[in-house]
């Protein structure tokens, strides 16, 4: 086992000890500490963080083939870049660390938790859509990575809240994990009242509300954009950025009663 494995395992153990995770849920996720989780659990060193408290924003963006089929690749790039611009102009930006994942049949951590100004902007080289939709695997892996890094910050004395948002245009295809596993993990994190979990579905042909509910995402944190067009998707990213900024300001209560998309 590498030192990175040891660090993540130690942080997850601490999360159980402090009540963020149940022992049962920890058992479910610690068997999947692969390279993607280790990459996602990295981030800015504690000694380099000057903010008195931190908001971790994790953005999970679907890169499956249906995104390309709908002609939405450039709209995803534009939307994510606009989100970064919105965060860059927010007064809370110095207390926000952002992680960016994309997923299709594979999962990629474009970067773990870094300041907004250091975040990667999507372009035609780093965002190309194709393949399946490993939604459940990505959700579980990203939440596990977030728990580990957030716990490292809290154990170091930095109060930390987390916002995790997934943007997808389809249901799961190809995951080894299931929606009940997602839901168990989501339930623990929401009960800790340190996490806001949000789901964005794009398209009119999928019952996204049911998928999100099965994954344990509260109804007030689910947004469905039926208009699967470039303009519709850009509006959706604008909504995500506004909601995430509100959450970083403490205007969105974390936990099961969170109204992430409530004005």
Image (spheres, rainbow, N blue to C red):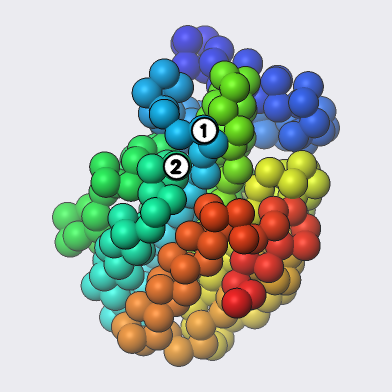
Looking at the image, how many numbered discs can be counted on the residues?
Answer: 2
For the question of whether residue 19 can be seen, the reply is yes
- Measure the C-alpha gap from mark 1 to mark 2: 8 Å
> Residue 109: percent from the left, percent from the top?
38, 42
Q: State the residue in front, 40 or 205.
A: 40
Q: Are marks 1 and 2 in contact (CB under 8 Å)?
A: yes
> What residue is at 40 percent from the left and 73 percent from the top?
238
Residue 261 shown left or right of residue 236 in the figure = right
The kind of secondary structure element at disc 1 is: loop
> Residue 183: percent from the left, percent from the top?
74, 53
Residue assigned mark 2: 95
Mark found first going from the N terminus, 1 or 2 = 1
Question: In the rendered image of this protein, does residue 16 appear above or below residue 170?
Answer: above
Question: In the rendered image of this protein, does residue 113 appear above or below residue 42?
Answer: below
> What residue is at 77 percent from the left and 58 percent from the top?
256
Residue 132 shown left or right of residue 116 in the figure = right
Residue assigned mark 1: 52
């Amino acid at each position: 086992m590498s030192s990175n494995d040891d660090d993540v395992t130690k942080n997850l153990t601490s999360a159980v000890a402090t009540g963020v995770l149940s022992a049962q849920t920890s058992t479910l996720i610690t068997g999947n500490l692969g390279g993607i989780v280790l990459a996602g659990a990295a981030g800015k060193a504690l000694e380099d963080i000057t903010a008195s408290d931190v908001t971790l924003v994790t953005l999970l963006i679907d890169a499956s083939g249906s995104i390309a089929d709908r002609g939405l690749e450039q709209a995803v790039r534009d939307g994510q870049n606009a989100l970064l611009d919105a965060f860059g102009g927010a007064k809370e930006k110095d207390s926000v660390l952002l992680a960016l994942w994309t997923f299709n049949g594979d999962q990629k951590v474009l970067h773990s938790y870094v300041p907004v100004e250091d975040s990667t902007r999507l372009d035609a080289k780093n965002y190309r859509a194709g393949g399946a939709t490993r939604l459940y695997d990505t959700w579980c892996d990203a939440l596990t990575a977030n728990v580990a890094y957030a716990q490292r910050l809290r154990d170091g004395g930095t109060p930390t809240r987390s916002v995790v948002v997934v943007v997808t245009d389809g249901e799961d295809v190809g995951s080894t994990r299931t929606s009940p596993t997602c839901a168990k993990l989501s339930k623990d994190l929401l009960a800790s009242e340190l996490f806001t979990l949000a789901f964005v579905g794009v398209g009119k042909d999928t019952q996204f509300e049911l998928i999100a509910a099965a994954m344990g995402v509260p109804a007030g944190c689910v947004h469905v954009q039926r208009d699967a067009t470039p303009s519709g998707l850009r509006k959706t990213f604008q909504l995500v950025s506004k909601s995430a900024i509100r959450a970083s300001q403490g205007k969105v209560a974390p936990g099961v009663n969170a109204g992430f998309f409530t004005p």
